[in-house]
Image: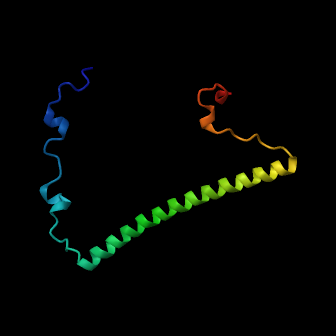
Amino acid sequence: DDAGADMDMESMMGGDTGPEAGDDPSLVENVEPKSFLEETILALQQLGIIIGVAIMVMFGFMVMVGVERLVEKMGEKYQAMTGKKQPEEKDPASLVGTFSRYK
């Protein structure tokens, strides 16, 4: 099996069987240019989509911050109910040069 080695470049590229020049959608003469008002409306719609996505990202960030604060409050309430206190964290600058920061 020669795996198609007897084919020439034109037969692999498709040769003359491509679309005719009249089939090219970029050559269509019937397209009317859009007015300034139509272009402005399309631009405002695109701007609205961008602003909407930015608002969704901000809303998601605010929800994450809210959930984090809620979990912290729940942890504080749990510690108050059980009477357990977490050890206070040491200042990271005071741990420089010691191996206790790796424990």
In the rendered view, tell whether residue 98 sits above or below residue 34: above
Residue 90 location, x and y as percent?
68, 38
In the rendered view, tell whether residue 2 sits above or below residue 33: above
Residue 16 horizontal side relative to residue 71, left or right? left
Quarter of the figure with residue 39: bottom left
Residue 26 horizontal side relative to residue 66, left or right? left
Q: Nearer the viewer, residue 19 or 61?
A: 61
Residue found farthest to the front: 94
At 56% across and 57% down in the image, what residue appears? 61
Residue 66 horizontal side relative to residue 33, left or right? right
Quarter of the figure with residue 63: bottom right
At 64% across and 27% down in the image, what residue appears? 102
Quarter of the image where the C terminus is located: top right
Residue found farthest to the top: 1
Residue 1 location, x and y as percent?
27, 20
Q: Nearer the viewer, residue 54 or 33?
A: 54
